[in-house]
Image: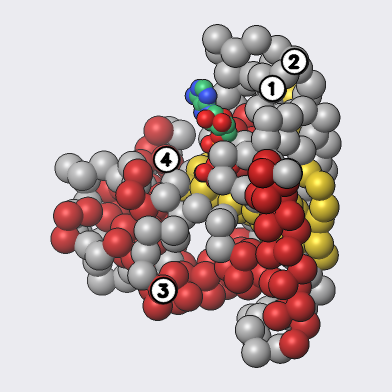
Amino acid sequence: MAYPGQSEGSDLILADLSLDIRDGEFFVLVGPSGSGKSTLLKIVAGTETQTEGQVSTHGAPVKGPSRQRGMVFQSIDEPLFEWLTVAQNVGFGPSVAGKTRAQCREIAAQYIALVGLKGHETKFPHELSGGMKQRVQIARTLAAEPDLVLFDEPFAALDALTRRVLQKELIAIWQATGRTMVYVTHDIREAVILGQRVAVMSRGPRANITRSYDIDLPYPRDDLDGRFADAVRAIEADIERESSSQWD
Ligand SMILES: Nc1ncnc2c1ncn2[C@@H]1O[C@H](COP(=O)(O)OP(=O)(O)OP(=O)(O)O)[C@@H](O)[C@H]1O
């Protein structure tokens, strides 16, 4: 993968990258800053196109953005419609998909309840906290009923306590909906709280996935469990190795 204007070869952002994500899996991607994690998400979302190679979901090649693949962004970039209420934001995807007003209201109510925002339906985004806005974003993405949900550091700008609450809630949402989740984070602890599999991306350019860890611990994960700490340490050591190799 090279961005327009970059010559292929030495300037490739991602190269020789091969990845299979299982249906219903919670897959987490970590790696050094600037390695290409967001780029990989955008390619899977269909908002960027790889210069070489193939990406497919459910056997069909990705040819551009699709309702089948929803994206949740970092809260500082959160793309809520400021002029719509919580219920209208969440019902937006179904309305674009041609559902009736009653169906949109019903779907919105279902996902608003799932993210714990019942009672806030008529509020506007400016009346919500950062954590609540992220809940709306998650509900809005899920209400479009995508098969695959892509998360680009969605909780990175939130305070530590809100982040912990939302991590737990996201696991419950994943378990309730059975969706495939692909989640990018800088926070290794978060990666191990969430992921069934945590993959480490190498430092770019020509980044690929160097290693992946199966996190075989029950949910909700207990960060006091020694195996939790072992997994965090091993992944941290991998990333440190990747990050420091640029100074070798
Ligand atoms: N639109 C673009 N045009 C040109 N280069 C880009 C573009 N977007 C990203 N890049 C470059 O691609 C590389 C990978 O960026 P990307 O944002 O995918 O990395 P990342 O691993 O998500 O970074 P971070 O962890 O810091 O968010 C970087 O060198 C970046 O400068």
Which circle, 2 or 3, is nearer the viewer?
2
Real-space CA distance between mark 1 and mark 4, rounded to the nearest whole angstrom = 35 Å
Real-space CA distance between mark 2 and mark 3, rounded to the nearest whole angstrom = 41 Å
Which circle, 4 or 3, is nearer the viewer?
3
Characterize the local packing of mark 2: few (<14), some (14-19) or many (20 or more) Cα atoms within 10 angstroms. Answer: few
Real-space CA distance between mark 4 and mark 3, rounded to the nearest whole angstrom = 30 Å
Check disc 3 and report the residue beneath it: 160
Dots 2 and 4: beta carbons under 8 Å?
A: no
Q: Position of residue 222 (x, y in %)?
A: 65, 86
- Kind of residue at badge 4: Gly
- Tell me the residue at 31%/58% (across/down): 133
Above or below, 92 against 63 in this view is: below
Real-space CA distance between mark 3 and mark 1, rounded to the nearest whole angstrom = 35 Å
Real-space CA distance between mark 2 and mark 4, rounded to the nearest whole angstrom = 39 Å
Q: Position of residue 110 (x, y in %)?
A: 43, 62
Query: Does the numbered disc 1 mark a residue whose Cβ is under 8 Å from ligand 1?
Result: no
Disc on res. 9: 2
Pointer 1 or 4: first along the chain:
1
Pointer 2 or 4: first along the chain:
2
Dots 1 and 4: beta carbons under 8 Å?
A: no
Check disc 4 and report the residue beneath it: 93
Which circle, 1 or 4, is nearer the viewer?
1
Between residue 34 and residue 75, name the one nearer to us.
34
